[in-house]
Image (tube, coloured by chain):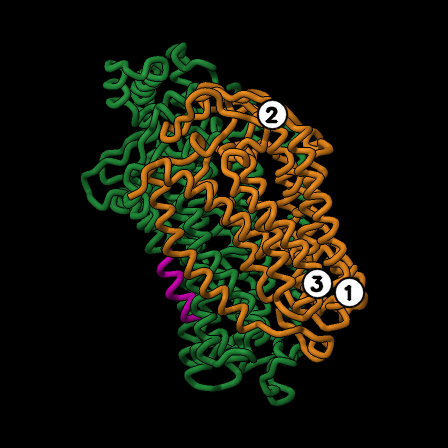
Amino acid sequence: MIIDSEVVTLSRAQFALTALYHFLFVPLTLGIVWILAIMESVYVMTGREVWKQMVRFWGVLFGINFAMGVATGITMEFQFGMNWAYYAHYVGDVFGTPLAIEGLMAFFLEATLVGVFFMGWDRLSRIQHLLVTWFLALGTNLSALWILIANAWMQHPVGAKFNVQTMRMEVTHFSEVLFNPVAQAKFVHTVSAGYVIGSMFVLSISAWYLLRGRNVDFARRSMTVAASFGLAASLSVVVLGDESGYAVSENQKMKMAAIEAMWETEPPPASFTVFGIPDVQNRTTHYAFHVPWVMGLIGTRSIDTPIPGINNLVEDTKGKIENGLQAYGAMLALRANPNDAQAKTTLAQYDDDMGYALLLKRYLADPRQATPADIQKAADSTIPNVPVLFWAFRIMVACGFYFIALFAYSFWLASKRQLDRNRWYLRLALYSLPLPWVSTELGWIVAEYGRQPWAIEGILPTALGVSSVTAGQVWISLGGFVLFYTALAIVDAVLMVKYARKGPDELGLWPMRHAPRAAGATDAKGALP
Amino acid sequence: MFDITTLRVIWWALLGILLIGFAIMDGFDFGVAALLRVLGRTEDERRVLLETIEPTWEGNQVWFVLGGGASFAAWPTLYATAFSGLYLALALVLLAFILRPVGFNFRGKIHDARWRAVWDGTLIFSGFVVMLISGVAFGNLFLGLPFRYDDDLYMTWQGGFFDLLHPYAILAGLVSITMLLTHGACWAAYRSDHAIAERAARVARWMALAYAVTFVLAGIWLGYGIPGFTVAGPVVMDGPANPLFKQVTIGGSWFTSYMLYPWFWAAPAIGILGAIGVQWTVGKHTLAGFLCSSLMLAGTILAAGFALFPFLLPSSLDPRSSLTVWDASSSHGTLALMLGAVVVLLPIVILYTGWVYRVMRGRVTLEDVRHSHNTY
């Protein structure tokens, strides 16, 4: 095979673009659906109509967003085959399973129930509709669970082994894939980020109503729910972010070192660099401001375990490439003669490092011809983009602490019933709206850009995963995505703003203009003008 | 529990079930969407048509997503090869699947005729694109596709989008369009206001006739004009999933498996009987018309799958690279695990899907849409 680097670059750009775009909508769905479930539970328990109308109003905005999430999600399911065919072949035996189970267990549930959620109000009893909402919430969140199990396997591939006869990774222990420690930390961290987004969404729009003096009791109630849920979520996102960081330092040492711009191994416990200007050329960080001990404690949870620096990791990688070449040679020998006992032993000994030999395929058709210079180049290529990771991580964490402060203050105001007294607070709540999206997207950039050059950490380099497509074809699809996604983003934003501005009052949801109509097959839909 | 050969056959059957599930469950959504401006002459009529499918299309679409996910897990090489090889065709299908959810949701959000016309356009487009491309893709399976693997099983594809438009593939596209339009029209006849239902029944009868003609033509052409693929030498059913371990010859007949297993003829017969059933039952205000068109779809897909068996994706460029049921599956462990997941979860899915259809049952009338205000 010959790797066309333009196809690789374009395919990566397309995947990054479509994934980041998809994740503008997903986390809002993940969060707001619980807020709807909480509101509807209050309605069923108290019987107060205002809570039902809150579910219906926030439900309209949820629906617009849900449609975009579904529309952009299908792209993700099929892009592995379209643009990453060798990846799909090489790891489909492991990676495909969580995606398929996601469809069966989660996506079916949420997609089937979403229609009844909107159109079933007058056809279901209160309890039945409440159950629909709760199962809808459960479905969306289970969906995230399975996707993150798949993603975690890319970061920390466990429970699988290379099979020389089929030229791919095959599952040996599915339970290890399922209970991957990275998956657990990542799942809670990611859904919590979604809950923060959902809470911020409700908080900000409600703050806007209070600033205008509209929908006051409606907005105060909504804000109280958002503040409580948001406080719990922002605490969870930071704490589980720490758990995620611990998992990363265990399994992806290079990503950790790049986030820290830590070029050399420090004597433990390592310090945390709050600020600095990473200099990739000279492999150093200028103007660094360190806080002693913090990194060592977060990363290793001990005071005497060292965290390896980038330069040391590159040296280690060279050794792994040498091992990988042993495995690669043995693999070729076995393919020629399946009964070669010597090759079998060598492959069994080194197959964990075979992926490192594949790093050389970017430069050479036959990795076995590699010179020490090639090996050095391949080892250097395992350093991700340090400045991007360094800054993305710091902005994300700063946002996280800001969310805790904002939601804690909101919660305090809500409990003192003073949410509408403080105009500067309301403005702050309104203008904070984009921040959780910024931090969430940066979080994915840290996780996935920091994984490079690997598609599957240590197993399959990204460049090797591409399909046999031409650059022209990918240009066409990429152009199409940019065009249609931009157009849809504009329409989505226009509709969101339009319906948020209209508010429950102008939509006739609250205060209610007339008593709710009797249920019946002739009028199943309720009362929007 | 099962040996690898049995699991491969089971997963071949499940692939068929997922395809048929998608065609039956989501096919009528596409059919109704494509016929939106034919069956719905006024805005109220179009809203009736849309409200017959709006509560359930989203769940139906998951059959497609699951088809993708399940083939990724159970037939990874098939998933990788077909989707990357048919790159631009798949990109068009994706576009249809991207425009459809927003079309449904955004259409009613602004009360303006031009706005609605735009989203009607996207719904009609998405309907026709998916019907046409799935048919054309099926047609191309019989012609063979231009791919080969190297020893690393890296696939190379030598062909572009327009190479797919062979006359036979276009005929297969017509089979797909006529059968799914029949299906959509049968649904509209079953669920929408009587004025629209009569129009829909007429469309269904004509489309079912057109389907029967194109389907029979496609069968005759396949029998007399298109060479079949045959696995040469002893067929190893439980070997490693590597397509390069076998030899394939071109020049036999695609009907060989029908000669081998005469009961396979039941499949095309069910397709034609379904079309006849549609003529009889559609417009009689019962579910029968819809059931007949569902049989039509199932029979057609089974007929194609039986003819291909054991091939999944024949290669015209390098016949031995062709993917078959015996050499394109995942490992024994994954097939068994996924079968377990399907056996446990699919009945649950069918249960709650059935419940949702029951809750949302009943004919949607013009009177309904004039008084209802959809928050969806």
B230 left or right of B126?
left
Q: Amino acid at mark 3?
A: Arg
Task: Say whether disc 1 or disc 2 marks the residue closer to the N-terminus.
Answer: 2
| Vertical comparison of A396 with B154: above or below | below
Residue located beneath label 3 in the image? B107
Q: Residue at x 34, y 39 (%)?
A: A156
Residue B146's disc is: 2
Q: Residue at x 59, y 54 (%)?
A: B295
Secondary element type, mark 2: loop
Q: Are marks 2 and 3 on the same chain?
A: yes
A193 left or right of A516?
left
Foreground of the two, B247 or A419: B247
Secondary element type, mark 1: helix
Residue located beneath label 1 in the image? B199
Q: Position of residue A328 (x, y in %)?
A: 35, 18
Q: Position of residue A219 (x, y in %)?
A: 54, 77
Q: Chain A in the picture: what colour?
A: green
- Which one is in front in this view, the residue at disc 2 or the one at disc 3? 2
Q: Position of residue A317 (x, y in %)?
A: 33, 24
Categorize mark 3 by other alpha carbons within 10 Å: few (<14), some (14-19), many (20+).
some
How far apart in space, not on screen, are marks 1 and 2 (Cα)? Answer: 44 Å
Label 2 marks a residue whose chain is B
Q: Residue at x 72, y 50 (%)?
A: B125
Categorize mark 1 by other alpha carbons within 10 Å: few (<14), some (14-19), many (20+).
some
Q: Amino acid at mark 1?
A: Arg
Q: Chain B in the picture: what colour?
A: orange
How far apart in space, not on screen, are marks 2 and 3 (Cα)? Answer: 41 Å
Q: Which residues are magenta?
A: A226-237
